[in-house]
Structures are given as C-alpha cells and as structure tokens.
Amino acid sequence: MNRGYHGFLASDPKMNAVFIASGRGIKPGAKIGMVDNIDVAPTIAHLLGQPFSGAQGKVISEILSVPR
C-alpha cells in the first residue's frame, strides 16, 4: 500500500498540484515535468541531511544544485 496518498488515488488528474522548490540546495531556474507526491518527502529529507530509508519515493535530483 502506498502511504502518503491522503485517501485519494494519485492517478486521478484532479489530484495534480503545482510543485515549487526554492532555497538552499535548489538549483535556480530548474524546470522539471510531473513530480510524484511520494518523491517530495525524500527530497526534503535529503536537503536536510537526514536519512529516510523507509521512503517509497526518490530524491528529485534534477532540482538539486549539487547533484546527488
């Protein structure tokens, strides 16, 4: 079971949202396509230097100023 789906299927296009990242560790002006919601928390954990071994998602490395 995918945790973090907030009770709705991610495959429903009505569940799409805007993703904006800014600040230390984020590459200025980076543009990416669709982002999976399960990738946000691992990316934040990475930026904070914290392990997140139980995450189902991945770090969104395309937005990092220092590639992973």
Image (cartoon, grey):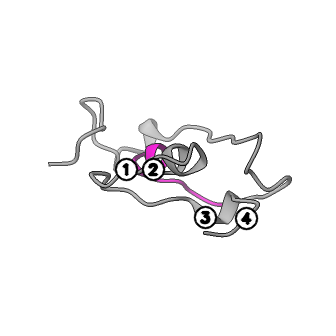
State the residue position of label 2. 42
Which residue type does callout 2 highlight?
Pro
The answer to which of marks 4 and 1 sits earlier in the sequence is 1
Determine whether label 1 and label 3 are within 8 Å by CB. no
- Disc 1 target residue: 52
Q: Residues within 10 Å of mark 4 (few under 14, many from 20)?
A: few
Q: How far apart in space, not on screen, are marks 3 and 2 (Cα)?
A: 10 Å
Q: CA distance from mark 1 to mark 3?
A: 15 Å
- Residue underneath mark 3: 61
Please report the bounds of the magenta region as a residue range.
Answer: 32-41
Estimate the spatial distance between the alpha carbons at disc 4 and disc 1, rounded to whole Å.
19 Å
Q: Are marks 1 and 2 in contact (CB under 8 Å)?
A: yes
Against 8, residue 37 (above or below) is below
In the picture as drawn, the residue positioned furthest to the bottom comes out as 67
Q: Give yes or no for residue 12 being in the magenta stretch.
A: no
Query: Which numbered disc, 4 or 2, marks the residue that appears first in the sequence?
Result: 2
Say which residue appears at 75% left-offset and 58% top-offset: 31
